Amino acid sequence: MRFEEKYIENLVIGTGAAGFAAAIRLFQNKESDVAIITENRTSGTSRNTGSDKQTYYKLSLSGGDMDSVEAMAEDLFSGGCVDGEISLCEAALSPRGFYHLVELGVPFPCNEFNEYMGYKTDHDRGRRATSAGPYTSKMMTQCLEKRVEELQIPVIEYYQLIQYLVEDNEIRGAVFVSTKAEVDSPYLIVWCRNIIMATGGPAGIYHDSVFPYSQFGATGVAFMAGAKGRNLTEWQFGMASVKPRWNVSGTYMQVLPKFVSTEADGSDEKEFLIEYFEDASQMLSHVFMKGYQWPFDVNKIFGGSSIIDILVYQETILKGRKVYLDFRSNPGDGEVDFESLSEEAYTYLKKAGALFGTPIERLQLMNQPAINFYLDHGVNLHTDRLEIAICAQHNNGGLATDAHWESSIRGLFGAGEVCGTHGVTRPGGSALNSGQVGAIRSAESIHIRKLHDTEEVVCSVGECGGVVAKGDRDICETGFYTEATKSVMRAKAEEYIRFIESADGTSNVNDIKEETTRKMSAIGGIIRNADEIQSGLEFIEGLLRGFANTVKKPNEQNLFHYYRLHQMLYCQKVYLTAMLDYAKKGVGSRGSALYTNPLGEKPLDVLADSFRCVLDASKHNHLTQEVSCEGEEIGFDWREVRPLPERDDFFENQWRLYRERRKI
């Protein structure tokens, strides 16, 4: 078994906006032994996704808007299932993270006096949102990457994470497999003290997804190592185009497109929304509101805009039809009675000067870049219909991390969507802020821990035999750990790798992935039923138990596909088990998921008669679900969220504590 080995004290996994930022923040904290490792630096969500006006959420920084760290923290906390200290950190550090991006060159707009004005986004009571356009996160990633290159921080490419090496619940290293053909050694062990995991959400577990095809996630690897999860049931789902994968939020909805449904072969074309509304004006007013309220929300179904998501879901998932947006002509008879729209819709379109024409003409006036995006990807909205589905867009849950963004495994930190730092709902754009805050917090925590970790120990690595500080960067030339520790860890790595040798199945990796991800979208999406989740979970568990006898043995050039499927299935198992536990808990429908129950209080008339649901679950938003994984055993702990911390803001006291913390 061929291993290459490296010693890197602080390893960042991932080259998105959070990963690059984490490496920069480590360097700023005088941690020079830093490297980034990635499957492919040009893949990932940050670089490859966006929307009509991709949002970044921060503290208000212009005009006379009354805002404060406390107010923003309260709004983040009010989304439900978020600990107060997490909300406080994300609010307090939002200006620092934002201005860092501005200084690096992200073109967030400001006025001539350098006020960075904002607009109101979903779940936002102020005007904290800003944007650099459809490609905000891509520009963030590019500017951060440029700074990493200027700092000469090494980036190791074409290695996929397959295993964490953990001893006494402390990280020792990580195992990677090469994604390139014809390498001397397909496996790499990186011995390290700290890892910042910035691998994004578990994008690969769903079929209907806005995540780019190049984004898979590696959350399953952390679960297999014993890291805890939090709020795994909480996602954001919404309407998105299928090819290319892109949110159809904001202006795409506000210009009032036509919704068309067909059979899979293109026959039986019809407009289906109008059947469920009193008239066309009511229908179009709801479509308009989807621009503001893009994520599916169970509390916006009855009398709200999320009924649109339900109707699209019914056409695609339950009926097996295809749904398209058609911008070429107006819905219905081709005329829009603008004055009969809701006051909000009419006022907005009037201010925009868009009380005329067809959807594409209104879109051309209001947001030409939204048309250009699709042109860049081979779709001309002037001539082509746009296929859509209800897609997974963001995991509000993820790894359970503390206020230092450290997981339940010491030395394993997270930054970005891999962390479960969001709860039931969140303001639009807060995820981009959270990734930058996680980078700051994890890097500073690593540095401060080293400052205070001064226990003297005898170095028994190599032959130096010297007495060194436990927190020293350079214990000796040959590495961080004793040969005994490395031997135990190598044995763990070899045990996991060897299971590939016994593979003798006949099923193709891609076929299994297609089947299980479609099942995940059907049973773990916006509508969930305990019996269906149980059945799907048993199917996934069966695949995991018989993995070696089911999956075809790969050649050396395709090893990474085999490991990726294995960790994806384990991740699906953990998420489905969490959803089943949630359903049995009887919490009810909340946020992004409607849990159907024949004994529920309210029928959902647009679906089958047997579908009933309990919608008011807000009283349970103080309860957060934590998931622990120990091999085959998955356990759950439900607890009340911690409130916003009480702080002593007397300057002299905090100044003294700051000097002690930083050893100044």
Image (cartoon, helix red, strand yellow):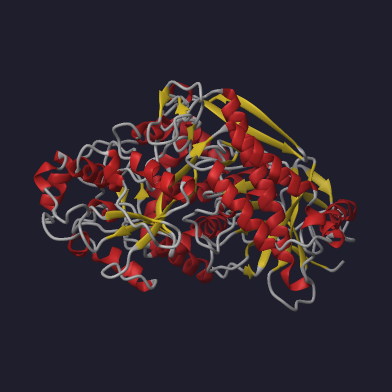
| Residue 424 horizontal side relative to residue 576, left or right | left
Residue sitting nearer the eye, 574 or 390: 390
Task: Identify which residue is drawn at 47% across, 30% down.
Answer: 611
- Residue 595 drawn above or below residue 219: above
| Residue 205 horizontal side relative to residue 539, left or right | left
- Residue 470 drawn above or below residue 101: above
Callout count: 0
| Residue 406 horizontal side relative to residue 488, left or right | left
Camera sees residue 271: yes
Name the residue at the front extreme: 268
Task: Identify which residue is drawn at 64% across, 46% down.
Answer: 572
Residue sitting nearer the eye, 489 or 343: 343
Residue sitting nearer the eye, 39 or 603: 603
Give the x, y percent position of residue 574: 66, 41
- Residue 81 drawn above or below residue 442: above
The quarter holding residue 362 reads bottom left
Residue sitting nearer the eye, 206 or 66: 206
* Image quadrant where one finds the C terminus: top right
The quarter holding residue 426 reads top left
Give the x, y percent position of residue 422: 48, 39
Name the residue at the bottom extreme: 182
Task: Identify which residue is drawn at 70% across, 40% down.
Answer: 538
The quarter holding residue 601 reads top left
- Residue 613 drawn above or below residue 98: above
Give the x, y percent position of residue 635: 70, 31
Camera sees residue 9: no
